[in-house]
Image (cartoon, rainbow, N blue to C red):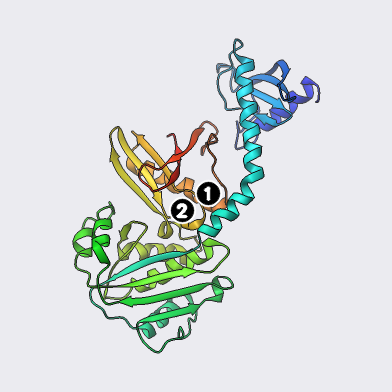
Amino acid sequence: MRTPEEEKLAVTQWLEHPHELGKKPYAIEFTSKFTTEDGIECMIFKYKKSLVGPWLLAISSDSGIFSEQEKYDPATEKEDALKLVEFLKQFWKNKAAEQEEKEKKTKTGGRFVGFVLLKNAEWSAEKFEQDFKEDWGIELGDGGSEDDVTRVYSVAENGDRTMLAVALMSAPVPNGEAEYAAQFNFMWKDAVAVTKTHGAHIVVSAFGTEDPRQSGTLFVKAVATLCRDENTLGAYYNEVVYEPKFMFAVTDMMKDGMFPLLGLVWFGLVRSENGFSAYTCGMKNLGKDEIEIIDTKEVPSELHNFMVGVAGYVVDQDVILHDGETIGFSNEQRLKIVKSEGVNVEGDSIKILY
C-alpha cells in the first residue's frame, strides 16, 4: 500500500469526481490505519466540504476508495471504516456476478404483450400496415396471412429475428381484467368508463431480440399506430389502461429520437398510510427489477419524476441495482437500496428509501 500522503492525494482526487463530492475538499487529514481479519489494509481519513462543515469519513483500502459523506466520529472510526470496507467487498462481488445476472434477466424479459381495446370487432390489417409505414417508415409485408384476424411480421429494422404478432379477438378482454386495470391510470379520469365500452381487442406481441429495448421499441410503435384508428379506445398492458393520446405523446418523443420508456413502463402512484408510494410495472420486460418507493411525504409530481429518472438511468446505462447500495442524482443525495418482496408489485422489487 502507498504512504498516507500518497493515499490522501488519491482520496482527494476521488472526492473531486462529479459523482462524489464534485470538488476538492476544504481539508483532509489521515487519522489511522488497520488491517481487517481477512487481510485487507485500510487507511482512514477525515475531510471537510467547507470551513464550517463537519468532518466526514473516507477510507482508502485494498478494495478501493469510498465515502458515504457521513460524519466522522473518532470514537467509532474503525467500526465505521469496517462498514465501508464491507460495502466495497460486496460491491465488487456484485460486479463479478452482474454479467451473469444481466444475461439471466434478459432471458426472462424481451417479450412484450398488450391488448388494444376496440369499440367493435373491426380491424384492417392492410390499413395497419399502411399506417405503420407512414408512422415509422417500415414495410411490414403481408404478415403471412390473407385474413384480417392474425398477422405475424418479421421486422429486421429492430434487430435480427425480431417478430411482431397482431391478432384480432372479437370479444372483450376476459374476466373484466381491463376494467379493473383502468382504475389505476391516475392521469385519465374516464379510463374505467371508456374501458367498459370495449367490445373487442387486438393482442399485440413483440419478441425475438437479444436486446429487450429493441423488441420493446417495436411493441410501442405497433400499439401507438393502432391507437390512431378511430375504433381504438385504449391499450391495456402493464396492469393499467393507457389513453390513446398518451401513446401519441410517446410517439412524438420517439420521433425525436428518444427511447419510449414511458410507453414501456408504467409509473404508478398510490396513497399510502404515511403519504404516497410509487412503483414501476414493466421493468421486468426490459430485464430489470421493478422499483418501488414506499411511504414518502414527497409531492406526487416530484416522486413521479424521480422514479422516471431512476428507471431511465437503469435502462439507459444497463445497470443492475443491488441490495445495500445507494443511489442519488446529486453529490449530497445518497438513498439506500433494499431488495425485498414487492408491496405494490409481484415478486421481489428494488426499494429506494426516499
Residue at 53% over, 49% down: 314
Q: In which quarter of the image is residue 349?
A: top left
Residue 317 is situated, as x and y percent measured from the top left of the image, at 57, 51
Residue 300 is situated, as x and y percent measured from the top left of the image, at 33, 42
Which of discs 1 and 2 lies nearer the camera? The answer is 2
Of the residues shown, which amino acid type is indicated by label 2? Answer: Met
Answer yes or no: do the residues labelled 1 and 2 have beta carbons within 8 Å?
A: yes
Residue 16 visible in the snapshot: no
- The reply, left or right, for residue 293 in relation to residue 199 is right
Q: Hey, which residue is sitting farthest right in the picture?
A: 2
Comparing 352 with 26, the one in front is 352
Residue 22 is situated, as x and y percent measured from the top left of the image, at 61, 33
Crowding around mark 1 (Cα neighbors within 10 Å: few <14, some 14 to 19, many 20+) is some
Q: Hey, which residue is sitting farthest bottom in the picture?
A: 146
Secondary structure at numbered mark 1: helix
Q: Name the residue under label 2.
A: 283
Of the residues shown, which amino acid type is indicated by label 1? Answer: Val
Residue at 60% over, 55% down: 103
Q: Against 96, is 185 above or below?
A: below
Residue at 55% over, 16% down: 52
Q: Name the residue under label 1.
A: 314
